[in-house]
Amino acid sequence: MPTTPIVIPVTLNNDTPPALIIPQTYMEVVVQGGLGIQQITWQLHGNASTGVFVNGDMAHPPIAWLGSNVPAPGVFQPAPGIGSGGLTYTLADNNPAGGTAQTYLYQLCAKFGNNYYYTAAASLGGNPATPRIKNN
């Protein structure tokens, strides 16, 4: 059974250097197992809509997994990956019942002109300010 896609708005703060901001309500996305593939889309929104997610740039991937808990192959897949002229990045979370129950910390990256900006990772130890996907 298909699930409703999760769409996460991403904005840019005005710090020096700027950083991508994910609203607090989306800092931990919980995906229940056994419900089928869950699409998660990050959308550059508002003042971040002048940026783009970049595909194929190994030094600046749209999403990077942080810490030692890196997802096994097949848990997450770009689906379709970058879309809407670079304004969105979508992953398919394949969380079969009991198969991938883990918490995955991540960092997003987007390009603005010649500069790359990231979500801030407060710590690799799982600080609540570090965005995460939790598969149950």
Image: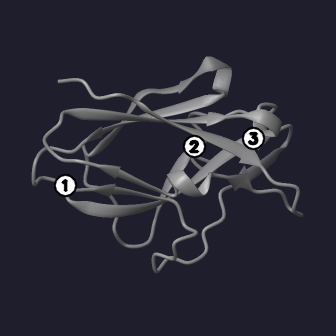
Which of these two is toward me, 78 or 43?
Answer: 43
* Amino acid type, callout 3: Lys
* Amino acid type, callout 2: Pro
Task: Identify the residue shown where x is 21% and y is 45%.
Answer: 95
Of callouts 3 and 2, the N-terminal one: 2
Relative to 35, 69 lies left or right: right
In this rendering, the answer to whether 75 lies above or below 64 is above
Residue located beneath label 2 in the image: 62
Relative to 94, 97 lies left or right: left
| Mark 3 secondary-structure assignment | strand
* Amino acid type, callout 1: Thr
Which of these two is toward me, 111 or 37?
Answer: 37
| Mark 1 secondary-structure assignment | loop
Cβ atoms under marks 1 and 2 closer than 8 Å? no
Of callouts 1 and 3, the N-terminal one: 1
Residue located beneath label 3 in the image: 111
Tell me which corner region of the image, top left, top right, bottom left or bottom right, holds residue 24.
Answer: bottom right
Percent position of residue 88, x then y: 59, 29
Cβ atoms under marks 3 and 2 closer than 8 Å? no
Task: Identify the residue shown where x is 86% and y is 37%.
Answer: 113
Q: CA distance from mark 1 to mark 3?
A: 31 Å
Q: CA distance from mark 1 to mark 2?
A: 22 Å
Q: Tag 2: Cα neighbours inside 10 Å, few (<14), some, or many (≥20)?
A: many
Tell me which corner region of the image, top left, top right, bottom left or bottom right, holds residue 34.
Answer: top left
Q: Tag 1: Cα neighbours inside 10 Å, few (<14), some, or many (≥20)?
A: some
Q: Tag 3: Cα neighbours inside 10 Å, few (<14), some, or many (≥20)?
A: some
Percent position of residue 132, x then y: 45, 59
**Is residue 51 visible in the rendered structure shown here?**
no
Which of these two is toward me, 135 or 71?
Answer: 135
Q: CA distance from mark 3 to mark 2?
A: 9 Å
Residue located beneath label 1 in the image: 100
Cβ atoms under marks 1 and 3 closer than 8 Å? no
